[in-house]
Amino acid sequence: MRKLVGVLVVLAVVSMVGCMPGKLFVEHDYSYEGQFKNYKSFNFLECEYIDSTLLCSDIQDAIRHQMEARGYRVSNRSPNLLISYNIFRSDLRFRGYQQPVIRDWVVREDDEATYKRIDYNLDEGTLMISLIDAETYQVIWKGYASKMMRNPNFKNNYFKGIVRSIFDQYPLMASQK
């Protein structure tokens, strides 16, 4: 009888683990055209997630917090960076790149650095944040998190942790020039 109870407990634990949400996948890539040493201000492009303005404000507040923690300031007049973000409603194939660590590249600005293409299959609910050079309108950094909607404890403030995980990939501070 003891063995049967033990086996049932083990089976219950194994089946619960199989139902748990997948680990959040977070990645980023950046453009070698970015002038990372010169950026000090930002503003947002309009939110395109039409289902919930509350969701937009939660994500935007979390991004603002991360940018300000890095020394960037919000500017309504001539920001250096524009920020776009989107939640993809279906699975998507996405082309990312394996590159030198961004902090190392910014220090050296190695003209010989190369991109290695990586194709990802990202899940429904992927949050993508793009930093865009306001002068050239070129995306200079993109961070994304997939598998975020699989969390059974999903709440609006859940995005603070997701956005923080994405910005953990962006260790740069604002220019002090």
Image (spheres, rainbow, N blue to C red):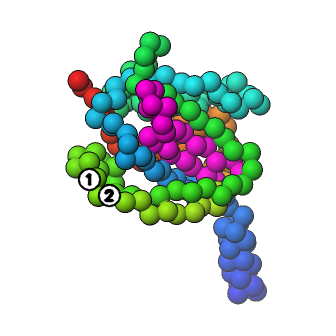
Q: Is residue 64 visible?
A: no
Which residue matches tag 2? 113
Left or right of 85 in this view: 33: left
Q: CA distance from mark 1 to mark 2?
A: 5 Å
CB of mark 1 within 8 Å of CB of mark 2?
Answer: yes
**Above or below: residue 41 compared with residue 26:** above
Residue at coordinates 48% horizontally, 37% vertically from top-left?
138
Q: Secondary structure at mark 2?
A: loop
Residue 10: within the magenta? no
Which residue matches tag 1? 110
Residue 141 screen position, x and y as percent: 45, 42
User: What type of secondary structure mainly makes up the magenta span?
Assistant: strand
Residue 81 screen position, x and y as percent: 44, 28
Residue at coordinates 26% horizontally, 53% vertically from top-left?
110
Q: Which residues are magenta?
A: 124-147
Task: Give the amino acid at mark 2.
Answer: Ala
Task: Give the amino acid at mark 1.
Answer: Asp
